[in-house]
């Protein structure tokens, strides 16, 4: 538990340092937000349970205040109160950061809860949608559908917020075809550290635009997105192949077959695929965006002979998205808070695991003390459109990734144990090829990871630090792993 305990000690030191300005902060916020219930402070009734409402119960955090502004102007006023009193600021949209970074990730942050920013409109000439940054993904899907049968790429958990998802990446089943959620953003309204409200796009405030597409939490608060949309995909086929137990070698061989299949550069972008390793099984699931005939012609099942498969055909987009949500709920309990730890890493087409490494990974997985049965490891096939965008075009840097690893260990009884953490750490170190720079997905926050900013933003970190120096030199917008100013 040493690592977790260090995190706790760091958190309590921070809270002492900021305590002095608290009266002045309170009066400033109460003056800025006059509606009843629009600001809450530690000590208020149900502060932790209702206003704070942590997602990862394993990470304690007490914000200095939680605010509920109703407009961009109020967001700006809150930022000004916090900056003038030297408090850090974080936006909270859906509150689903694995590190509770929407609450600051550590004590003493002024939280800007965006739940009232629900504006929505569709321009039916350009099919560009305007979306308030407090909108949850489930509502994004529904509102785009209602506004002319439109869609965009995003993840599958409906309780995740657009604010944290569109600004960090946003990978989902359609990303191989349409890009990450952030690749849809054509313009954003952003509140900066000096509390000015600016428009960021390819032609205005380009540095801000670059930074908010992948690293927004350290650069400002997006209040509104304008996004490109696509016609809803029509017919789609959801497939699932389940492999119960099997020897370690059989499991490793199945993984090798899957990796070989998805690493064929000619594979259609209409196919999404995830391989999940669980305590007692391996599952290959995904969606094919096309007709049943086209799906059958792919003959996926022949890739893994002897494995049981099934497929469901969906004619309607909302039905398909609803089915993904049920699947997400089975995996991580969906939107429900729990004690868990998670890690990520990635491979590009040129550094995929070789056969020996895959064998070693399964030997380790099958023999290690995992500290729980409630663990799983996902291997997400990426590539496609997300690889078409140059690395230096957006803060999101992992443009060469073909496969993402996400690992999870959950404790339903209390805090995550060091044994659970060690297991996920060891898997990551086994599979990361020597010498390859360590990559992590910034949307799967790993608060215990060293060199977080390097792993999250890779080659784009120096430019982000430069922009940070220019637009937020006092580091107003911060969490434990956001980029620091260059000087
Ligand atoms: C069950 C579950 C399933 C998931 N599935 C996927 C998936 O399929 N694909 C995927 O890519 N990711 C997925 N994620 C990860 C998810 O994208 C991130 O956790 C995301 O950052 C959460 O956004 P949020 O708004 O809900 O969280 P919050 O905690 O509110 O915010 C997360 C971070 O973003 C910042 N932020 C929020 N809003 C704004 C804003 N308007 N302006 C600037 N900064 C802002 C916050 O300050 C914080 O640092 C999943 C997470 C969960 C819990
Ligand atoms: C396929 O399903 C059958 C019947 O449920 C089961 O006995 C068999 O073990 C399964 N095969 C694999 C490879 O999981
Ligand atoms: C991909 O397609 C090209 C052109 O049809 C072909 O030459 C190549 O061999 C294919 N590659 C693989 C790995 O199938
Ligand atoms: C606020 O900061 C931005 C970015 O640095 C700058 O362009 C703008 O002029 C500043 N506004 C004010 C009022 O100082």
Image (cartoon, rainbow, N blue to C red):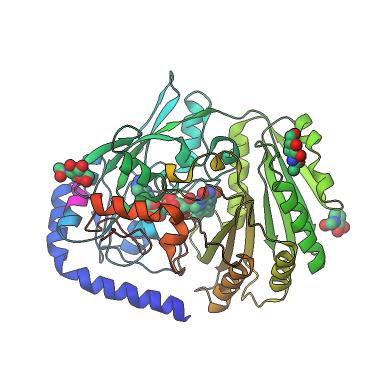
Query: Split into 4 quadrants, where in the image is the C terminus?
Result: bottom left
Picture mark count: 0
| Corner quadrant of residue 246 | bottom right
Q: Foreground residue, 258 or 206?
A: 206
* Above or below, comparing residue 447 to residue 189 in the picture: below
Name the foreground residue: 111 vs 476. 476
- 146 or 289, which lies in front? 289
- Across and down, in percent, residue 55 comes to 44, 60
Image spot of residue 49 (x, y percent): 37, 62
Residue 353 percent location from the top left of the image: 68, 60
In the figure, is residue 259 to the left or right of 170? right
Using residue 51 as the reference point, say whether residue 369 is left or right of it.
right
Residue at 28% x, 75% y: name it: 13
Magenta span: predominant SS is: helix
Give, as a single range, the part of the protein colored magenta: 76-80
Magenta stretch holds residue 79:
yes
Q: Position of residue 383 (x, y in %)?
A: 60, 44
Give the camera-side residue of 414 and 79: 79
């Amino acid at each position: 538990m040493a690592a977790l305990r260090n995190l706790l000690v760091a958190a309590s030191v921070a809270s002492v340092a900021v305590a002095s300005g608290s009266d002045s902060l309170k009066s400033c916020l109460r003056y800025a937000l006059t509606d009843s219930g629009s600001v809450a402070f530690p000590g208020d009734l149900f502060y932790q349970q209702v206003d704070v409402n942590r997602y990862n119960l394993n990470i304690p955090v007490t914000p200095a205040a939680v605010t509920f502004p109703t407009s961009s102007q109020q967001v700006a006023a809150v930022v000004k109160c916090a900056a003038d009193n030297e408090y850090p600021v974080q936006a909270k949209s859906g509150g689903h950061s694995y590190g509770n970074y929407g609450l600051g990730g550590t004590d003493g942050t002024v939280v800007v809860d965006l739940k009232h920013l629900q504006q929505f409109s569709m321009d039916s000439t350009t099919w560009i949608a305007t979306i308030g940054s407090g909108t949850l993904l489930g509502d994004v899907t529904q509102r785009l559908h209602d506004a002319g049968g439109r869609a965009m790429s995003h993840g599958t958990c409906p309780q995740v917020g657009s604010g944290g998802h569109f600004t960090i990446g946003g990978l989902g089943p359609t990303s191989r075809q349409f890009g990450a959620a952030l690749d849809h953003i054509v313009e954003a309204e952003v509140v900066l550290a000096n509390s000015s409200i600016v428009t960021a796009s390819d032609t205005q405030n380009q540095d801000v635009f670059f930074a908010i597409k992948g690293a927004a939490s350290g650069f400002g608060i997006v209040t509104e997105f304008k996004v490109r949309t696509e016609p809803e995909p029509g017919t789609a086929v959801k497939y699932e192949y389940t492999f119960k137990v099997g020897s370690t070698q059989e499991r490793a061989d199945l993984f090798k077959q899957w990796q070989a299949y998805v690493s064929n550069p000619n594979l259609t972008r209409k196919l999404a695929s995830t391989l999940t390793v669980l305590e007692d099984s391996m599952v290959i699931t995904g969606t094919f965006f096309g007709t049943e005939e086209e799906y059958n012609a792919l003959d996926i099942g022949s890739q893994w002979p002897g494995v049981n498969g099934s497929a469901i055909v969906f004619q309607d987009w909302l039905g398909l998205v609803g089915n993904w949500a049920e699947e997400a709920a089975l995996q991580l309990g969906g939107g429900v808070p729990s004690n868990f730890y998670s890690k990520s890493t990635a491979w590009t087409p040129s550094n995929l695991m070789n056969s020996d490494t895959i064998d070693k990974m399964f030997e380790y997985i099958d023999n290690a003390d995992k500290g729980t049965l409630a663990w799983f490891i996902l291997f997400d096939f990426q590539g496609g459109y997300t690889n078409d965008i140059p690395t230096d075009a957006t803060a999101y840097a992992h443009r060469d990734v073909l496969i993402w690893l996400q690992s999870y260990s959950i404790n339903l009884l209390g805090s995550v144990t060091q044994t659970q953490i060690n297991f996920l750490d060891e898997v990551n170190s086994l599979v990361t090829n020597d010498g390859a720079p360590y990559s992590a997905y910034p949307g799967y926050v790993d608060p215990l990871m060293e060199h977080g900013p390097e792993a999250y933003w890779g080659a784009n970190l120096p430019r982000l630090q430069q922009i940070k120096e220019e637009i937020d030199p006092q580091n107003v917008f911060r969490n434990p792993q956001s980029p620091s100013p260059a000087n």
